[in-house]
Amino acid sequence: MWFDTWSDIVRILAVGAAAYLTLILVLRLTGKRTLSKLNAFDLIVSVALGSTLATILLSSDVSWAEGFTAFALLAVLQLVITWTSTRAPSTRSVITAKPTLLLRDGQPLEKALHEERVTMGELRQAVRASGSGDLADVGAVVLESDGSLSVIPAEKMGAGTALDGVEAARPPDRASRSSQ
């Protein structure tokens, strides 16, 4: 149908504007972390907030007060989860996935690629996107907890301290490196 009634349009304008302003207020009150994309859980909250806004806009069955309650619930749950994961490290593994090393010193780690279901083509794409044309020029590729691939050029690896806490990462054996 192309058009129902003017009252539906006015409702969308009024409730939509109020819901949008409410969402901005809730996000400002709860901080930047609410919409971060540090892990899969954060993505779920962002999608849920967007879905809630769309429902408030388009469904006359959902009042502004119900929408506000949904926004507040999602924001509070996000705060509780992130607060808990930062203060109780043992809960972090339940909430977020650990980053995984997929390539070290130009060598793909086949077992990690297989376990994380990442193809060599996807690994090469990430390396190309980083500006490298050769895997040998890459010190590390990490599948982050948010699903993105981080590429560290070999000349910027340094001591590799950024890989602390990365699954399958271990400091390179100095003896084997000096013999190469």
Image (tube, grey):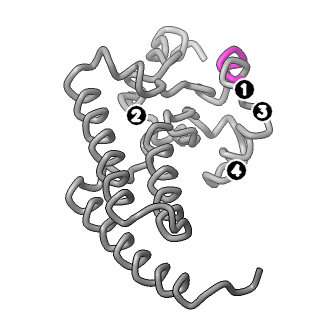
**Residue 117's disc number:** 1
Give the distance between the C-alpha atoms of the residues marked 4 and 1, in whole angstroms: 19 Å
Residue 72 — which label? none
What residue do we see at 48% from left, 11% from top? 173
Mark 4 is on which residue type?
Arg
Within 10 angstroms of label 1, few (less than 14), some, or many (20 or more) residues? few
* Count of residue discs: 4
User: How dense is the environment of label 4, judged by Cα within 10 Å: few (below 14), some, or many (20 and up)?
Assistant: some
**Mark 2 Cα-neighbour bin, 10 Å: few <14, some 14–19, many ≥20:** few
Q: Quadrant of the N terminus?
A: bottom right
Q: Which residue is mark 2?
A: 158
Above-or-below relation of 57 to 92: below
Which residue appears at 47% of the width and 57% of the height? Answer: 52
Q: Which residue is mark 3?
A: 120
Question: What is the secondary structure assignment of the residue under circle 4?
Answer: helix
Horizontal arrangement in the rendering, residue 143 relative to residue 14 (left or right) = right
The residue tagged 4 is: 128
Mark 1 element type: loop
Alpha carbon distance from label 1 to label 2: 28 Å
**Sequence order check, earlier mark of 3 and 2:** 3
> Which segment is the magenta one?
109-113
Q: Residue furthest bottom?
A: 6
Which is in the foreground here, disc 3 or disc 4?
A: 3
Q: CA distance from mark 3 to mark 1?
A: 10 Å
Q: Nearer the viewer, mark 3 or mark 1?
A: 1
Q: Is residue 111 magenta?
A: yes
Can you give x and y, in whole percent of width and height, for residue 92 in the image?
A: 35, 23
In front: mark 1 or mark 2?
Answer: 1
Amino acid under disc 1: Arg
- What is the crowding at mark 3: few (fewer than 14 residues within 10 Å), some, or many (at least 20)? some
Q: Position of residue 106 (x, y in %)?
A: 65, 30
